């Protein structure tokens, strides 16, 4: 499975802790992330992560394009609901809408992410491998 990791600045440490806790599950999948979040997670966990641009430099759009081409199976985007910058809300809405449109499981908080990762570990998302059996690896 291909999993995208994103987090607003105030949630990057939570994403790192989450990925550390579930490194065993995540290590069996292909991970990608926006630049800053991905670097933090990779350094803390040792997991191989394909890095896209930083969020502010177009990383959101790069992940959005992968969603539009059905190249992702799961998105974990830890949102900071206390950040009242409308651009941040637009980012979450943009990614969430693409996930809805392309039937990709999406988590915006740690509780939902935990349910999805546990389901991933049980094989609950294996149906995506049937829909998209031969997908290419990420490229820059």
Image (spheres, rainbow, N blue to C red):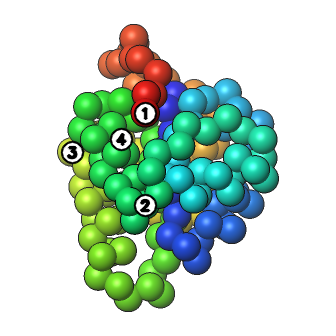
Where residue 59 sits in the image (x, y, percent)? 40, 53
Q: Which residue is mark 2?
A: 55
Discs 2/1, front: 1
Residue 140 is labelled as 1
Q: In what element is the residue under mark 4? A: loop
Sooner in the amino-acid sequence: mark 2 or mark 4: 2
Disc 2 versus disc 3: nearer the observer: 2
Mark 2 vs 3, N-terminal side: 2
Q: CA distance from mark 2 to mark 1?
A: 15 Å
Is residue 86 shown above or below 128?
A: below
Q: Quadrant of the C terminus?
A: top left
Where residue 53 appears, x then y in whole percent?
45, 51
Q: Which residue is mark 4?
A: 104
Kindly state the secondary structure of the residue where label 2 is placed: helix
Q: Position of residue 128 (x, y in %)?
A: 40, 25
How far, Cα to Cα, is label 4 from label 3? Answer: 8 Å
Is residue 83 placed above or below 117 in the rendered structure? below
Do residues under tags 2 and 1 come within 8 Å of each other at their CB atoms? no
For residue 128, side relative to residue 119 (left or right)? left
What is the crowding at mark 1: few (fewer than 14 residues within 10 Å), some, or many (at least 20)? few
Nearest to N terminus: mark 3 or mark 1: 3
| Disc 1 element | loop
Q: Secondary structure at mark 3?
A: helix
């Amino acid at each position: 499975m291909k999993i995208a990791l994103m987090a607003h600045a105030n949630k990057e440490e939570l994403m790192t802790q989450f990925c550390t806790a579930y490194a065993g599950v995540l290590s069996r999948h292909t991970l990608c992330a926006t630049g800053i979040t991905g670097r933090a997670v990779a350094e803390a966990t040792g997991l191989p992560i394909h890095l896209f641009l930083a969020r502010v430099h177009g990383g959101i759009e790069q992940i959005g394009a992968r969603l539009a081409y059905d190249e992702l199976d799961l998105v974990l985007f830890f949102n900071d609901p206390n950040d009242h910058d409308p651009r941040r809300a637009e980012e979450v809405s943009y990614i969430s809408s693409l996930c809805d449109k392309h039937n990709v499981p999406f988590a915006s908080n740690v509780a939902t992410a935990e349910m999805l990762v546990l389901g991933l570990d049980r094989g609950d998302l294996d149906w995506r491998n049937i829909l998209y059996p031969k997908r290419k690896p990420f490229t820059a």
